[in-house]
Amino acid sequence: MTEKYATTMTVTEVVLPGKVEPSGLQLIRRELPAPEAGQARVRVEATAVSAAESGMRRGRYYPQPPFPFVPGYDLVGVVEAVGPGVNSALVGRRVAALTKTGGWATAVLLTAADLVEVPDGIDADDAETLIVNGLTAYQMLHRSAKVQSGQTVLVLGAAGGVGTILVQLARHAGVRVIGTANPRHHEALRALGVEPIDYHAPDLTARVRALAPDGVDAVFDHLGGASIDTSYQLLNRTGTLVSYSLASKIDETGPVVPVFLKLMAKLAFLNYLPTGKRASFYNVWAGAGKPGSAKRATFRARTRDDLLAVFGLLRDGVLTAQIAARFPLTEVAVAMELSETSGRTALGKIILVP
């Protein structure tokens, strides 16, 4: 059986009109059509602000759609209606979705096959912290670096949305964690089992070497740019560097594509060196393929398996959701401003509640 609303509904969305300051984000109301075949309409309970949106508003997230568009990399919500071909049992269920854009809204239309049901007993805000950030952390740790119990890893930006999950997952796996962060977050990171280092310390490399004289087994680097060489040098003889963002380049004004291609070339060069070390770039969308393709089906299955694994760890108390702040969707500009200074002011993820 399927259900479908016969009429449209009015929704509120946040539109990014171009390269603007957070105050330039626009709130609009429009009519959202009824779900078509294969679609579900989801009433959004929680979405979030991340580094991706900060890059997008500067036109420096690769790739991003042309302006104007609705940001919002992921969301948690309740299915309110489904289109033809979708099981009506999905109606009323809380689901999570990885969207890349479109999540900053009171309701959205999504492909039903992309939805992952959130296990009972998990709060919407807590679940939201684990979608793109949880997938990124889990897959980098277990699919990219393939860490093992007893190893040592270095997490750059350990107090961020990805970092706070990554360090918890690593500790659960029996891995020693060294993490860089603003000193104001060091106490909280110690409580998570991290050995913190000031990320602005001029002798950061020496401090890491003092803690891991033979080098670390993996480095998770969100900065890109010049930090790649340093991260690679801090690896032991068989270590793995996982780069996953270009945060250090976010405030530059030139074209972002050459910067990204330069990073890819750098990582490829490092892999050609006869050192025994490995270097890679992690992208949560890698291997997604085109809609309807075999690659897309494999991507969906992997995403579902890994996200449910992370949700299970949250439900079982292994993971603690790190929420820096909650804001109404209408205060998205304030939320984005906080997000962009979170290294100094906030630990964890900033949630938007429609």
Image (tube, helix red, strand yellow):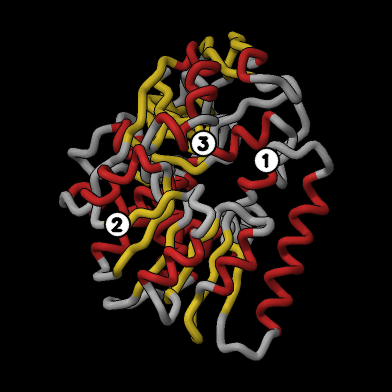
Percent coordinates x, y for residue 29 in the rendering: 59, 9
Label 2 or label 1, whichever comes before in sequence order: 2
Between 142 and 251, which is closer to the camera in this rendering?
Answer: 251
Q: Are marks 2 and 3 in contact (CB under 8 Å)?
A: no
* Label disc, if present, on residue 250 of the rendered structure: 1
Cα separation, mark 2 vs mark 3, equals 23 Å
Q: Residues within 10 Å of mark 2 (few under 14, many from 20)?
A: many
Identity of the residue drawn at 50% across and 59% down: 203
Q: Amino acid at mark 3?
A: Ser
Q: Are marks 2 and 1 in contact (CB under 8 Å)?
A: no
Q: Quadrant of the N terminus?
A: top left
Whether residue 335 is situated above or below residue 154 in the rendered picture: above
Cα separation, mark 1 vs mark 3, equals 13 Å
Percent coordinates x, y for residue 172 in the rendering: 24, 63
Between 146 and 183, which is closer to the camera in this rendering?
Answer: 183
Can residue 180 be seen in this snapshot?
A: yes
Between 193 and 307, which is closer to the camera in this rendering?
Answer: 193
Between 230 and 15, which is closer to the camera in this rendering?
Answer: 230
* Label disc, if present, on residue 50 of the rendered structure: 3
Q: Is residue 273 left or right of residue 254?
A: left
Label 1 or label 3, whichever comes before in sequence order: 3
Residue 284, picture quadrant:
bottom right
Quickly name the residue at label 2: 194
Q: Is residue 291 left or right of residue 135?
A: right
